[in-house]
Amino acid sequence: MNLGEMRDNLQGNPTTLRFKIGEFIIRFSLQISVLLMVTGIVSAYLFIASTTKSLTNHTSQLNAQRYLEALSAFRTLYTNEVVNIAIKQNITISHDYKNIKNAIPLPATLSMALGKEIGKFQSGAQTFLYSRYPFPWREQENKTIFNQDFSQQAWDSLTKNPEQAFFRFEEVDGQMSIRYAIADVMREGCIDCHNNHAQTPKNDWQIGDVRGVMEVILPLDKAQFTAQSSLQATFIVLFAMMALITLVLFIFFSRIKKDAKKLADSNIEMMNKQEQVNFANEEMSLAIEQLEHKAKELVSSNQVKADFMATMSHEIRTPLNGVIGMLSLLKQSELTHEQNHHAHLATVSASSLLNIINDILDFSKIEADKLVIESVEIPLAELVTNLSATMAHIAHQKGLELIVDVSQLKHVVTRGDPHRIRQILSNLINNAIKFTAQGEVVISTNIAMIDEKNLQFSCSVSDTGIGIAQHKLDSMFERFTQEDSSTTRQYGGTGLGLAIVKKLCQLMKGDITVTSTPGQGSTFSFTLLLEACDYIKAELPQVDLSAYRILIVDDNKTNREVLDGQLKLWGAKVSQADSAKAALSCLAADLSNDGHKSFDIAILDMQMPDMNGAQLGQQIRADKQLAQLKLIMLTSLARPGDGQYFANIGFNFSLPKPVITADLAKALVQVLNDDKATSQQLTLPIKNISKPITMKPLPKSTRILLVEDNAINQVVAKTLLTNLGAQVEIANNGEKALLCLEKGYFDVVLMDCQMPVMDGYTATKTIRKSQHDYKDIYIIAMTANAMSGDREKCLAAGMNDYLTKPVDIIALEKSLLKALNMPLAQLEAVIPRRTEQNITNKNKAIKAVDESISNNVWGKAGFYKRVGENQPLAERIVAMYCQDMPDEIDKLSQAISAREIKSIAAIAHKIKGSSANLEATKLAQCALEIELDVKENNCGDIDVLSIKLKDNFTELLTELEEFIAVNVPN
């Protein structure tokens, strides 16, 4: 039918018109459908192809951008963390590092080498670094690069607009690739090297100048071509299907032309087919949305950077821990002196780098509010003096006086976090020693009562070092800040230490300040708010010093003043002399005054000008009129055998500097009693000293059930209780404790909280819920947990009292007397008792005691005090510890390797308890950190802590084996 006929038909009646239209639609519906399908498929193909190409190109840009950003970040990290350290250690840094012994590459050289290495794994990837101002060794290479249009255009574009990357897509080596370039901008850490290098082509660089171009050539992802091929194959299939459908429809429509009903059915079928096409289009749209969503995820470059930095941190720490571990093993092998020295230097360097990383982690924990402050009892004076003693040898090696004044503390016991207080003090004392070439470092302390529950601890660390410029003082406690860049080069450090100190002070409700005069020294002063305890431990001489005259001879005024203050606090009459000559004059004048009481003791410093302490002592001993004068030597250069030497030339006692107050008290008691035991203990009139209870025996009928799984803890606790007069029975866990209570009568239960089978909390709750006669028995908790809330947890379980491990004998007796409803005795100064062996040897000549500097590896004095000066018990506990602990250390290592969290916590808890009873504080603290980390599901640092724990144990075992060799018979 032509158009004329169609027009004539349309002018007919409506029925005919509708019929003709229907006939037209039926006749041409196949052609119309085919045309629409072809149009739709072609349009969809073109749209998807365009979108896919756009997404692929955008992804290529992002990949190139991230590639160069990662390379630039690595270069910056290498410059800051490796090159700066290498410069300090005089390591050569050169582009020709492969031909120079012990040299490392320049940052740019390393970047190019890294790009080439990456190119090996990504076929066709190329990295270029070029400039209009190249160093001579790169001049020819730069000329070749600038012969390319892209390189010239990139340089021109980036020098005008450094922030805007320059790129384009082109064929390189037969592959379609993206060429992407960014500006290499001059940064602060690079400017000195570029301006001052002997072969620099330009010496007036400024920060922000474009010094070159970093370019990467990346072949387009093969996935693009694969996707296009897949798309073409898909549409070929669709066209084939379309042809098949057309054939089917043609046959179908030819059969139903004569039947109207079949025509209607065919219309319905066509509608269904159209719905299927629509559904296919919807699925295609959904696929496009998913592709767009994936593209948005790829754009999140910040997450990529974060993952990169996390990986870098892990990759640095993991091999570093391996290096430290292998060096530790190496040092235990047979080495020459030179090899051992090299291994030591390598260990120090690796440990320094690890300390830097740990500082960063500490600071991160503080910033994230994840650092927990503990609350345990702290004898402040003992903490300060012991820590100072461990650092004294560093000061003495530099010829510095390290002076500690704890006289104002009066041996206050407070509650706080001893580990963090040591961290603050260690940082400040280390800095003072580091930045002081001559003179002294003085640590001064004070304590003030804020209210009934709180004390303010004040401490200052002063030095006579290089000082700090006034305009730098306000920024000293900011992170990554030091006095100036030359300080960093000369003395090292991250600039994080003081920032961490300030944060720790603030966490303990205190603060830190600094005053300084350049060239004269600095004073760092900090305050901490600590909890008050029930008593103050009095470390006093067992003799009344008010009747004695003491002469202090020292050329250092600060030393004299500190000793003078402490001795006068104890009631002594004190005189001072600033030289050996002045001392001799003072003694001569004293002898000529018949009505004047002579000096009883002279305390001499070893290191003095003109005449040292040993020479002065010999001259005094040569004078028969001074035969009764007792001599005490103070020396900052103590060596093995010095004690015997000083004894041979007439000294009664020798002490290392800085002088620990308890050691000074011990020395005074010994020299004034001619090494005899003192029959009386005298309480000296010192204000504000609360008195702990006197050791008072318990009734002989007292029966105590000790529930404890640790063998060493069992021995210590049972011995202490037996010495108090109690009868003791031991149960290894809560389940056995219940059986013991059912079989016999007990007055008190000492209950450990963390045990296998049944812990102390469960056992206590079971006792309280039972209907037996023992349901109301007095239960005292003994736990190594001293965190906030632990006491409340014990009381909530039904326990009556709470003691922290290692158990203090005074606190134990106080709790037992309370349990037995016995009155508390008035406290006298508690001084460790001497053994009978020491008492009987009265006729021997006075011997000098060579006191070694405490290093916190093993607190031998504290351990002896804990076991009541019981030598056989001390030997037994040390032997048990040396026998059992190596196995526990091995078990812990195996558990850490297998990441068995429960086993790690249990074994670390056991090591902590046994070590604390032995006063091995460093090892106990390390085990505690491991235990707390795994309980908080924080296993990131336990490998480092495990190495640290093994090192601490090795040090401790050396001291314990020496103790056994001397004291325990074979």
Image (spheres, helix red, strand yellow):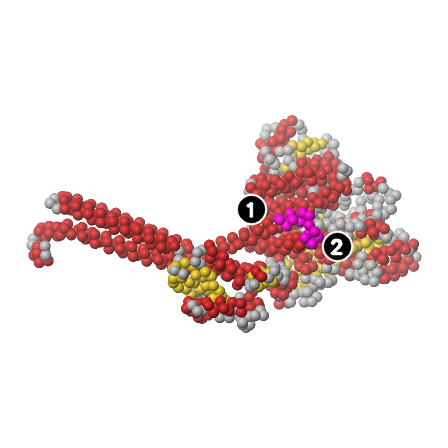
Q: Residue pushed farthest front? A: 99
Magenta stretch holds residue 188 = no
Residue 361 % position (x, y): 57, 53
Q: Residue at the location (61% across, 55% down)?
A: 353
Q: Please, what is the three-letter code of the amino acid marked with disc 2?
A: Pro
Please tell me whether the stretch drawn in magenta is mainly helix, strand or loop: helix
The amino acid on which the numbered mark 1 sits, given as a three-letter code, is Cys
Query: What residue do we see at 55% from left, 48% from top?
Result: 940
Residue sitting at x 85%, y 40%: 840
Query: Element at badge 2?
Result: loop
Q: How many discs mark residues in the rendered view? A: 2
When asked about the image quadrant of residue 754, the answer is: top right
* Region of the chain picked out in magenta, as a range: 325-340
Which residue is identified by label 1?
939
Across and down, in percent, residue 482 comes to: 61, 63
Q: Farthest top residue?
A: 743
Tell me if residue 403 comes above or below residue 689 in the rendering: below
Regarding residue 629, the answer to whether it shows in the image is: yes
Q: Nearer the viewer, mark 1 or mark 2?
A: 1
Is 218 situated left or right of 355 in this image? left
Query: Could you tell whether 492 is left or right of 37 in the image?
Result: right
Q: Is residue 655 left or right of residue 370?
A: right
Horizontal and vertical percent for residue 123? 44, 56
Specify whether residue 328 is painted magenta. Answer: yes
In primary-sequence order, the first of circles 1 and 2 is: 2
The circle drawn on residue 761 is none
Residue for badge 2: 658
Q: Is residue 595 visible?
A: no
